[in-house]
Image (cartoon, rainbow, N blue to C red):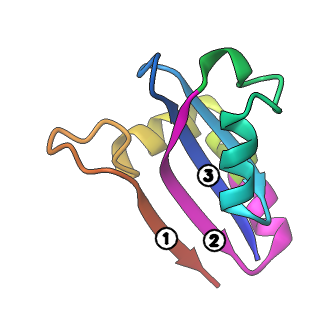
Amino acid sequence: MKYVYILQSERFPDRYYTGLTTDIKDRLSNHNRGLVSHTSKYAPWKMKTYVAFSDDGKAFEFEKYLKSGSGRAFAKKRLSLYSPFGFGWQAILLL
């Protein structure tokens, strides 16, 4: 199982990070311990959304899409990143 995830910085709420992993809890821990160079200066992070994929190729393509301009717009509109209702994270399972 592969997970595409979106994190939000707790200190810099306008800062988001999108990634791909096989272990969501361990990866979040690595981000928060400063072990990921791209995110260390914006730690701590909280999980906003993650999507589980049984197909590795589809997971990779979805991560790539979310890092594009249209993918960021999709995430903002459809994945509750900026929810006016204050919802936290959400999880989606795609088989």
Q: CA distance from mark 2 to mark 1?
A: 6 Å
Q: Which mark is residue 52?
A: 2
Q: Which region shows up in magenta?
A: 44-62
- The residue under the point 65% across, 40% down is 18
Q: Specify the quadrant that holds the C terminus.
A: bottom right
Along the polypeptide, which appears first: circle 1 or circle 3?
Answer: 3
Query: Is the Cβ of the residue at disc 2 closer than 8 Å to that at disc 1?
Result: yes
Q: Residue furthest left?
A: 85
Q: Residues within 10 Å of mark 2 (few under 14, many from 20)?
A: many
Residue 65 as seen in the image, left or right of residue 93: right
What's the residue at 41%, 22% (across, down)?
13
Which of pointers 3 and 2 lies earlier in the amino acid sequence?
Answer: 3
Q: Secondary structure at mark 1?
A: strand
Q: Amino acid at mark 3?
A: Tyr
Residue 38, numbered label:
none
The mark nearer the N terminus, 2 or 1, is: 2
Task: Name the residue tied to disc 3.
Answer: 5
Q: Residue 53's image quarter? A: bottom right
Q: Is residue 77 above or below residue 11?
A: below
- Quick check: can you spot residue 24? yes
What distance separates the C-alpha of mark 1 from that of mark 3? 10 Å
Verify whether residue 53 appears in magenta.
yes
The part of the image, by quadrant, that contains residue 77 is top left
Callout 1, which amino acid?
Ile
Asked if marks 1 and 3 touch (Cβ < 8 Å), the reply is no
Q: Amino acid at mark 2?
A: Ala
On the image, the x and y values in percent for residue 63 come to 71, 49
Tell me the residue that label 1 is attached to.
92
In terms of secondary structure, where does tag 3 sit? strand
Q: Residue furthest front?
A: 33
